[in-house]
Image (cartoon, coloured by chain):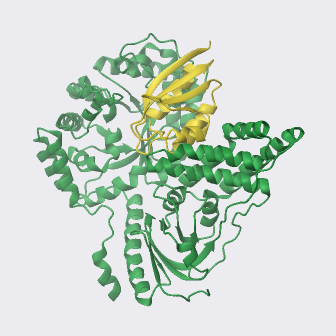
Amino acid sequence: MSARIRRSVRVSNDLGLHLRAAGVLVQMAGGFACEITLERDGAGGQRANAKSIMSVLALAAGRGTALTVEAEGSDAERAVEALCALIDRGFES
Amino acid sequence: MPPGSGRPRIFRGIGTSAGIAIGRVVLLDRRSVRFRRHHIEAKDVEAEIARLESAITASVAQLEAVRTSFAGSAMDHKAILEAHEMMLRDRSLFTEASRTIRDELVNAEWAVSQVIARIRSLFDSVADPYFRERKGDVEFAGERILRNLVGQMNDIAEVPAHAEGVVLVAHDLSPVDTAVLSQHKVKAFVTEVGGKTSHSSIIARALEIPAVVGAHGIVDAAGSGDQIIIDGLDGQVLLRPTKIQVERSDRRRVIFDRMTLELLEAQALPAQTTDGHSIRVAGNIELPVEVATVISRGGEAIGLYRTEFMFLGRREPPSEEDHYQTYRKVLAEVGDRQVTIRTFDLGGDKIFQGMAPLELEANPALGLRAIRYCLRHPEIFEPQIAGVLRAAMHGDVRVMLPMVAAVEEVEDAREVISQVSARLTRDGVPHKTDVPVGIMIEVPSAVFIADHLAKHVDFFAVGTNDLLQFLLAADRTNERVDYLNHPLHPSVLRTLRTIADAARAAHIHTSVCGEMAGDLENTALLLGLGFDQLSMNATSIPKVKRLVLELAKSECDALLSETLACAKREEVVELVRQFMSSKTLLQPNWDEEDEVARA
C-alpha cells in the first residue's frame, strides 16, 4: 500500500518546534521508510523535510503554528499518526 | 595588558542563568576558520566528496566523544549535543554540499560554506527570536566541518585552573565548548552574542552556573587573569571590580545561594502546607526512560503512565510478555514509589499499525476509543491487564481506566480483570489479585455519577485536558474555540468540587493529572479542593512543591470559596492573581543584604 496521508496538527507546547523537539521529531521520522513533509498552513506554506533537522528548524514553528504532516509510502499512515501524536503531546518524552 | 591592571569596567548584557560568581577571566579566542574557493578537476570530484564525508564523520565522532564523556546529569545539555550531531548527520547538508562540489567543481570547504550560508539565510527572515538564534547552531555545525576539512580543530582541551575560580569570556560558545567547560569547573561565563534561548544559555541553566550574554566588547577589554564578577540576575558584568563592588556582589551571592538551597530542599521535602496538610506531587511519563527525570526532580510517584507508546514501531499489538517486561523496567527504577498505569487510550484518532482497522468516525474524540475500544478488543486489552497484574508482584501498582462514562464500563472492565486473574491462577503464573483499580474522570457524565462510580473503584484521577474540552464543548485542536478551554472557568472549578466531594465521601484517593496540575496558577485551588495528588511533567515538580511549602491550606480554602462564587473566568483569574502576588515564589530576598553584611 502506498498512499498519501495528510493530517493537520497544531504545535501547542511553549517553545514550539525548538531544537530538542526538532531532534526528537527528526529521529522519529527517520524510523519510517516513507517520505514525510511538514507544511505550514496558510498561503505560501513553507515546507520542510521531516527527516532533516535543519529543514525542520528553519520552519520556525513556534507555539500555535498550524502544520500539515504529509507522508507517502508504505508506512505513511503509521508515520503521520506517530508524528501528530508527538506534536500533540508537546514533544514530551 | 597584565592581569589586574586597567580601570574597572561595567558591561551590561542579558542575564540568562541566575546566580552570582566572582572569579578570574579565561579568554577563549575563537577566530573564524579561513579557506579559499578553488576550482577542482572533474576527475577529482569523487575524492573531494569523500573528503567531505570523512570530515563529517570526524565531526560526528568528536561530538559523540564529548557527549558520552559528559557524565553530568544535565539532560538538556546532552539533548542539545545530540541535536548538533543530527545536524552534522543531516543528509540534506551532505547531499547539497556534494551537489555543489559536482556541479560547480569547487572544493568541499567552499561547498559547505555555501550550503550553510543558504540555510542560515532561511533563519534571517524568521521573526521569532528563539528560532532566529538557531542559525548559531547551524553555524557551529558548519564551522566544525570546515575546521575538520582544513585540519584546524581547536576544541578546548584544558582550562587553566585558578584558585579563585575560572570565568570564561568568549565571543560565543559552541555546545562542545560548554560541555568540555562543565567538566573543568568553570564558575560562570559571559559572551558577546547570544540570547536567553541560545544553547550556551540553556546549558548554563542546566548546569546551574551564572551566565550573561550580549556583553558587547568584553573580549577586547578583558585580559586573562583579570578579576571579574558575573551577575546572572541583572545581566551585569564587572571587570576589574573595586573592593566595594566585590563586597557587595559577595553579599548578593550569599543571599542568592540561600534561596537556591531552599529550592533544592523543597525538591527533597514532602509537599506539605504551612499548616500541615500534605499533597503528593507525582510525575507523568510515557516511556520507562522518563522515570529517572521524575525522581531526580523530586517526584513522589508516577501518577500517570501513558502506555500507548508500546505500540510504536510494532507490527503486532504488544504481547502479555511485552507489557510485563516494560512495566517491570519502570518498577525497577521507581523503588517503592507508586506507579499508576493507564490502560490504552486507543481508537478514535489514535490508531497504530497492528490494530484492527477502524471505521472512519466523523467525531473521533467522541468515538470508539479508550475503555470503549478496549472492551470491544479483548485481544488488545487482556494482554495488557495480564502484564499489569504480573508486574504488580514487583512494586506498588495501580491500574487506571481512561474515558469512563458509565458504571457498566467499570463493571465490565473489572470482569475482564477477574477473568484474566483466574486464567493466570489456572496457569500457575504469579500475579497480584487485588491490584487497585481506578478511573480517569474526563467525561462530564462521569462527574454527575461520581458518587456511584466511587463505590466501584479504588481511586479517581481527573484528566483535565479532555474534561475541559468536553465540559466546554470546545475542541482543543480548534484554535477558534480553544480560548474557552481555560482551567479557571467557573464551571471547571465546580466540576472539580463535585468530583473531589464524591471521592471524599467514599474515602477514595483522588488526583489531578492533566496539564492543569503542573501550572502554579492552579496549585492553591487544587489544594483547596482537597485532591490527594497532583501529577505533572517532571519539570514542574520542584516549582509546585516549593509553592505548596509556602501555602496554608486554610488560605487555599478561602480562595476556593471566593472563586466558586464567581460568574466569569476573568474574575477567578483576577482573584488568583491577587492571591499569588503575595507569594514570594522564587524571588531572592534582597532585604537581607544588611543582615548578611553584619554577619
Q: Is residue B431 visible?
A: no
Q: Nearer the viewer, residue B157 or B8?
A: B8
Q: Residue at x 50, y 49 (%)?
A: B132
Residue A78: image quadrant is top right
Q: Quadrant of residue B245?
A: bottom left
In the image, residue B426 lies at what x, y percent?
Answer: 54, 20
Name the image quarter holding the C terminus of chain B.
Answer: bottom left
Residue drawn 66% across the image and 43% down it = B115
Q: Colour of chain A?
A: yellow
Q: Nearer the viewer, residue B567 or B248?
A: B248
In the rendered image, residue B58, in percent from the top left (x then y), is placed at: 77, 51
Q: Give the side of residue B94 with respect to residue B14, left or right.
A: right
Q: Residue at x 77, y 36 (%)?
A: B103
Q: Nearer the viewer, residue B43 or B6?
A: B43
Chain letter corresponding to the colour green = B
Residue A50, position in %: x, y? 58, 33
